[in-house]
Image (cartoon, grey):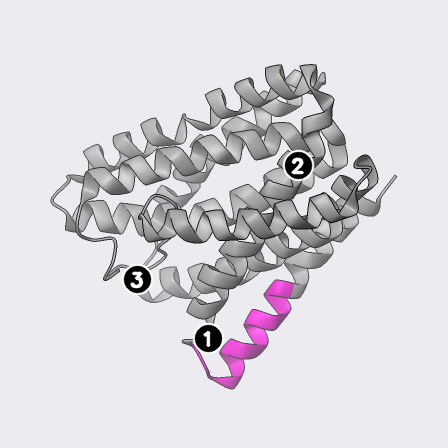
Amino acid sequence: MSLPGYIIFFSILGSIGAVLGASLILFLPEQYRWKFISVFVSYATGTLLGSALLGMIPKAMKLSTSPLSISATILAGIMLFFLLEKLVIWRHCHEETCDVHTRAGPLILFGDAFHNFVDGTVIAAAFLTDIRLGIATAISVIAHEIPQEIGDFSILLQSGYTKSKAFLYNILSSLMTMPGAFIAYVSLNAIQTAVPYILALSSASFIYIALADLIPGLHRNVGLRSSVTQIVSIACGIFTILYLVMRH
């Protein structure tokens, strides 16, 4: 498969595929559905941290002549995503009730479209660097998008949307992954010097999502069985990325 083919395939898988996966999970009985989501969120945490710390950051450092500038970009990225979340543009919700995000269905769709556009940029930048890193990054995107889309479905339904409209609008917002990937492929392919900094910003978004959003939600389940399941799932996510990044 050619490089553009990889980017297109995994961009579709990370957008439309995630929405379809989320819609299938919604058909599960409620008691099983939220147990499954808890495991999936834990696994997503591992893949996000693994992709950022084992894949993107080492690759960005290797491609850049200034490791300090890469570190500064990561720090600036974390601050940027904090600001965007304050503006309710970069937001996540994996629950049926979400105090911040149930206020406006259209805002959820706008935020999701923006997020998917960034995901497309992240996937393309990773593939332009290394196919193995691209696959690892795409898996991380898919893993954290599925529980997020489930949360989005719940929020839109609570906002008065029908099931068919909620599904359609989620599909449409997910399609923003494609222009994000296309723009990144065209521009970064021409300006290779920007790739390390895009990787640094991408790693900042992954770290922020994992630490500011996913892990605090996992701490709500404090039972021994839940904790062990979460730790094992996080470890599985990390080792998945480690395998993909390190294999030859």
The verdict on residue 227 being magenta is: yes
Residue carrying label 1: 219
Image position of 93 (left or right of 44): left
Where residue 202 sits: x, y (%)? 59, 42
**Mark earlier in primary sequence (1, 3):** 3
Give the extent of the magenta segment: 221-234
Name the residue rendered at 74%, 52% in the picture: 54
Query: In front of the other: label 1 or label 3?
Result: 1
Describe the element under mark 2 as helix, strand or loop. Answer: helix
Residue carrying label 2: 197
Pointer 2 with pointer 1, Cβ within 8 A: no
Name the residue rendered at 73%, 23% in the picture: 192
Out of 83 and 145, give the one closest to the viewer. Answer: 83
Describe the element under mark 3 as helix, strand or loop. Answer: helix
Can you name the residue that lies furthest to the left here? 160
The amino acid marked with disc number 2 is Tyr
For label 2, the crowd category at 10 Å Cα-Cα, with few meaning under 14, some 14 to 19 and many 20 or more, is many
The amino acid marked with disc number 1 is His
Choose top left, top right, bottom left or bottom right for residue 156: top left
Q: CA distance from mark 3 to mark 2?
A: 42 Å
The amino acid marked with disc number 3 is Glu
Name the residue rendered at 54%, 18% in the picture: 182
